[in-house]
Image (cartoon, rainbow, N blue to C red):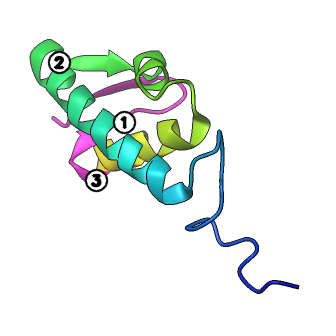
Amino acid sequence: MDGDACDSRTHAYRNGKTFEQCRQEARGVTDILAGEIARSGEITWSRVLEAAGHDEIVYKLTLKYLRERGFDIGNFQAPKVKQKE
């Protein structure tokens, strides 16, 4: 059995992309959404999902990267991303 058969860095992960490609895509989406949040004050999780191309991995990574940049990503009761107060 091949030892790296499940290595997501080199094998197709989802939608034919590797995990690294998903991470790069999420970083690009994060840049775009950070600008939208700066202009409008907040965006919905639905907007994040739409910007991520309805790819669950890219969506979750984008939320993670937005949180790492200091945004309040909300919760299930307040599904919005906004600047921290």
Q: Which mark is residue 41?
A: 2
Q: Which mark is residue 27?
A: none
Give the structural element (helix, strand or loop) at label 3: helix
Placement of the C terminus among the 4 image quadrants: top left
Mark 1 Cα shell of 10 Å, populated few (<14), some (14-19), many (≥20): many
Q: Position of residue 51 (x, y in %)?
A: 40, 23
Q: Which mark is residue 73?
A: 1
Tell me the magenta residue range: 68-85
Q: Residue at left 41%, top 17%?
A: 47
Label 2 amino acid?
Gly
* Residue situated in front as seen by the camera: 31 or 68: 31
Residues at discs 1 and 2 in contact (Cβ within 8 Å): no
Q: Residue at left 59%, top 36%?
A: 56
* Residue situated in front as seen by the camera: 72 or 63: 63
* Residue situated in front as seen by the camera: 15 or 67: 15
Task: Answer left or right for 41 relative to 7.
Answer: left
Reply yes or no: does residue 25 show up in magenta.
no
The residue that mark 3 highlights is 68
Label 1 amino acid?
Ile
> Rounded to the nearest whole Å, what is the CA distance between mark 1 and mark 2?
12 Å
Which badge, 3 or 1, is on the more N-terminal residue?
Answer: 3
Which badge, 3 or 2, is on the more N-terminal residue?
Answer: 2
Q: Position of residue 28 (x, y in %)?
A: 29, 39
